[in-house]
Image (cartoon, rainbow, N blue to C red):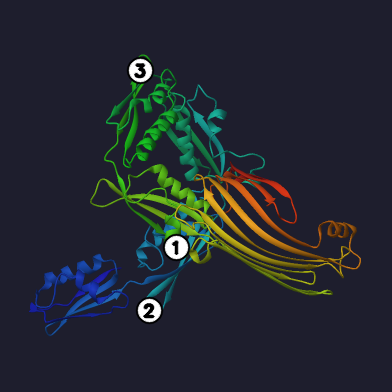
Amino acid sequence: MLSAQLFAFDDFLVSDIRIIGLQRVSTGSIFNVIPISVGDNIDQRKSADITRSLFATEQFDDIQIAKDGNTLIIIVQERPSISAIDISGNKALKTEQLLESLDGVGIKEGEVYKRSTVEKVKSELVRSYASNGRYGAGVDIEEIKKPRNRIELNIEVDEGKSATIESINIIGNELFSNEDLLDGFELSSGSIFSFLSNDNAYSREKLKGDIESLESFYLNRGYLKFSIESSEISLSKDKKSIFINFNIFEGEQYTINDVEVVGDLPFEDEVYEEITDSLKDKIYSQAQITGIEEFFTNVLGNQGYAFAEVSGNPVIDDNSQDVKITFSVMPGKRTYTRKILFTGNNLTQDYVLRREMRQFEGAWSSDNSIESGKVRLERLGYFKEVNVETVPVVGTDDQIDVMYSVEEENTGSIGGNLGYSDFGLMVGFNLQEQNFLGTGNTVAVGINKNVYSEQYNLSFLDPFATKDGVSLGYNAYFRETDYGEYNVANYLTNSNGIGLQYGWPISDTQRLNLSLTYDKTDISVGTQPAREIWDFVNAEGNIYETLNLQTQWQRVTLNRGMYPTDGASTAISLSATVPGSDLNYYRINLRQKFYQPLGRGLVFGLMAK
């Protein structure tokens, strides 16, 4: 209950204003709201205006106005703020989903709590469950008072039993069977395995999607006047079964007899004539019309017309059952990109993202170039998710800002091992970071030591050593192995080397890499080495210096650098020793990766070497 008390007093000139009872609300915000200030004359009418203005802020449960001499006194009782919301008992719906529903009615942490909204909270949560087929859900809310005028809400949910779809009926269809129409539905009446798959569960969102699917089914087959006359959802008395009925009107099938394009197009007719002419004498299909609309939008978007509007409008002739399609094209003004902005890159430096851009600031905007920047950022492997948005610049009609928002991924790995066996101590440490200190450089360090061997590796790669995308890398290593006492091979090797790598971009998806590695290996045989080792040393000696040259062609069309779900990666490399090396050999290697999404969260992957 809201209340206000106005103490009776005569008119007076306000020399001071005192506010009592504030805990969370600032004094300044009160003075910004009340329609009076020091030096003003106040009467009963203005007192009422003060009360109304303060109640309008929805911050107070009670307001009293009084005077002390010429001092105006405003006594307030603040509404509590919500310190925490705890939801328990929910399994079918995630807590985040329920909190989002509460946010829709103004209930979230940090907001003012209005006790009048308690029933709205219950209704909103029950509605959320009802939209997912749980009509018997119930909600209890407990208010726990906390210090500093705060309140904690404990919401206990009884989800109840989920109602299942008993049947889906379509009435009025003569041209297509129920099976054909229901084949594209997400909702279904289930099967004998529904207790495992839960495929007969009801969802309001799925129902909306199925209605759109039904409309698309007919519109893509030429039935332009198809309509859903009514849709009825009924619930059994025990609230366990749902029955869905659609009454539809199919209408007649229409054929396209003419196609016209109108508007001030900035390109020649030859660009689109072949595509639009392909519609003539074909059965009307809304999917084809939408595809051509997107074609015009893409062509215009790539030429800088970011705000182009295209619509394909059918003109129906009921007598001949023909339809004429008129594509209305309004390019609007040509736009250019004012700024390219990045958010979410807390570690990665701004220039690392900016060098992947194919759209440039100050240039005409291009949808392909903007999207290409998004794809290139995803392929880096630094980010879980990349989104892009074009925002019109306020006050102009020919400028946009391009906003890339990224969510960073863990790009480093660190590992180590420590152990002991009968042969001695084993120690290992490995560190690899693909985005070292947010620079986009790759650094790797490896140290491993045990009774048989010691290995030390250090490598560095700068993928953008030049502004043209030429990469430069270095690596150095030392390896010592001793198979004398503990292995039948009975030999010892010492190897050390250094390498240099260059890479040149051929296109956005192809790259040519070249590396040169110097290696020196010393083999010492034991008292009883294996025959193969003995024969090799006798034939080639025990110290070898080689210079290895490797060339590699690489093509990557993966949609992401880490955990890809679509695209392919192909690498063909030829490695051989340079003439004059102590040992001569060559090797050809092919590495192939392929990913194809299968739907339902499944991905087909193939890797071959």
Residue in front for this viewpoint, 99 or 245: 99
Amino acid carrying label 1: it is Gln
| x 44%, y 71%: residue | 152
Q: Is residue 382 above or below residue 39?
A: above
Q: Do the residues labelled 1 and 3 touch (CB within 8 Å)?
A: no
**Could you give the CA–CA distance between mark 1 and mark 3, rounded to whole angstroms?**
62 Å
Answer whether residue 72 is visible to the viewer in this image.
yes
Residue in front for this viewpoint, 94 or 511: 511
| Total numbered badges shown on the rendered structure | 3
Label 1 or label 3, whichever comes before in sequence order: 3
Q: Name the residue under label 1.
A: 349
- Mark 1: give few (<14), some (14-19) or many (20+) Cα within 10 Å: some
| x 33%, y 47%: residue | 363
- Mark 2: give few (<14), some (14-19) or many (20+) Cα within 10 Å: few
- Mark 3: give few (<14), some (14-19) or many (20+) Cα within 10 Å: few
Answer whether residue 122 is visible to the viewer in this image.
no
> Residue 31 vs residue 276: left or right?
left
Q: Is residue 1 above or below residue 234?
A: below
Q: What element carries label 1?
A: loop
Q: Mark 2 points at which residue?
A: 148
State the image quarter where residue 258 is shown.
top left
Amino acid carrying label 2: it is Arg
- The quarter of the rendered structure image containing the N terminus is bottom left
**Could you give the CA–CA distance between mark 2 and mark 1, rounded to whole angstroms?**
42 Å
Q: Name the residue under label 3.
A: 318
Q: Is mark 2 on a helix, strand or loop?
A: loop
Give the image location of residue 393, x and y in percent. 28, 51
Label 2 or label 1, whichever comes before in sequence order: 2
> Residue 17 vs residue 440: left or right?
left
Q: Is mark 3 on a helix, strand or loop?
A: loop
